[in-house]
Image (tube, helix red, strand yellow):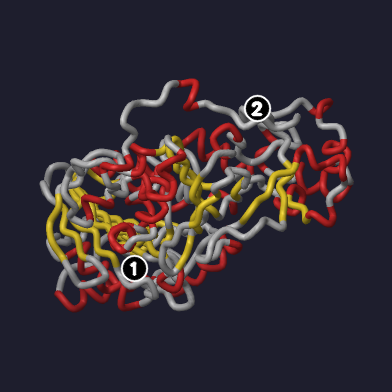
Amino acid sequence: MKGFVPTPTALVDEMVRKLLRTVNVSAATTLLDPGCGEGQFIAGVRRWCKATGQPVPQMLGVEQHPGRADEARRRFKDIPQITIVASDFLVPSAQRFDLIIGNPPYVSLGNLSAEERESYRSRYRTARGRFDLYMLFFEQALTLLKPTGRLVFVTPEKFTYVDSARVLRRLMLERSVHELHFVSEDSFDGFVTYPVVTTIGPTQDYSRTHVSLRSGESYDVQLHGDDSWQSIIRAEPATHAGPTLDDVCIRVSCGVATGADAAYIVRDVDMDRDLRRFAHPTVSGRQLRRAGLETARSFMLVPYDHNGRLLPEQRLGALAHYLSAPARKAMLTARTCTARKPWYAFHDNAPLNEILRPKILCKDIAPEPFFVADTEGTVVPRHSTYYIVPHDPAVLPELLAYLNSSDASQWLLAHCQRAANGFLRLQSGVLKRLPVPESLVPAQPFSSQLEMETLTISA
């Protein structure tokens, strides 16, 4: 199975304790370890049983990798209560278990083949949006868990807030989420994963969820709904009475994902004159500086009209010729998005009518947030850049000053997720919830004509 990372012994023992501390284990108790590797969790359960004098339950380890499955069989060959099968855990099964424990593989959508994606989407409710394989393991494990059963998994914490995990959050709340324990980001040697250990028990067994943060804080919360759980986990007030960034903006979004920047991004000195009508100044997150937005040295070739509609190939002229060069076309046709889009389309559409306006830009990942203005509204940001477009361009200086203020910075530091090395990961869902001053709210709603005012571009 792709995405296999062994679980450290100390974490294994802590997870086994969470699984078994309230359970009366008998010789008839059934336990499943999906993606068992060489049997770290099975060995941890044996240690617990020996230390507490409880009988060893009937344990099944499922491991798709033949070599690891063979190693686990050799490890437990003399223990009749333990069975290891070399199989794909994500195939249908009618078996049900009292206990499930494990560390599912972390495999992002981009590391799955098109065939795998479609197969999973046809079988799993959680295979939506930019899903990760561990979400499917969670769904399958919840399906195989008996109504009175108990489950402990260690996974990335992203399922608590990403939109693609909405279904998974709903499935979890059909039972009881007993605990969310956010363990150290360096728990897995050589990897920075921001893991959380999730403990799930029988339906309505617990009315509240115990949260343990990496800071050492711990308290109980009431999880609800399929929206991001972050505000609940961080024990924020249930509602914010004042306006938010989403209230004062047309759009708060990450930049354009072409899926092949090497084909679409060109330097001015390299650009043929016939390509200029398709070219827009562009910046990546790495190019943003606190001192302000430098004159763009790179340009994005955009095959979309000002309303975000993909231009017909026959209207592309020089751009079609440029993109059809063998190396570029091979790069473009290799993208997964071409299974449902023309070969020259971006991975995501480019809503130029909203992008080409006065706006504010920020990096998607940074040690601390900072914001710069595109006052002319000419820059098309790339996927590693977020752009913030106010309803009223006149408030842009005040909005920029507020976003760079200590009040906004402290709020973002408290609410943003962490990436590697403690960097902040800004996301549109978090940015939209940022409280803003009342003075930034438009005095009256803009008319649809003003809202959709278009900067004319040649097509």
- In the image, taking residue 268 as reference, residue 379 lies left or right, namely left
Please report contact status of discs 1 and 2: CB closer than 8 Å, yes or no: no
On-image quarter of the C terminus? top right
* Closer to us: 338 or 198: 338
* Closer to us: 375 or 296: 375
Q: Going 25% across and 63% down the picture, which residue do you hit?
A: 181
Q: Going 46% across and 39% down the picture, which residue do you hit?
A: 393
Asked whether residue 97 is in view, the answer is yes
- Residue 34 position in % (x across, y down): 40, 56
Q: For residue 225, which quarter of the picture?
A: top left
Q: Going 19% across and 52% down the picture, which residue do you hit?
A: 236
Pointer 1: what residue? 42
User: Residue 309: which disc?
Assistant: 2
| Inter-mark Cα distance, 1 to 2 | 55 Å
Q: What amino acid does circle 2 point to?
A: Arg
Q: Going 34% across and 68% down the picture, which residue do you hit?
A: 41
Q: For residue 60, which quarter of the picture?
A: bottom left
Q: What amino acid does circle 1 point to?
A: Ile
Mark 1 element type: helix
Count residues near mark 2 (Cα–Cα under 10 Å), then give few for <14, some for 14-19, many for 20+.
few
* Closer to us: 105 or 215: 215
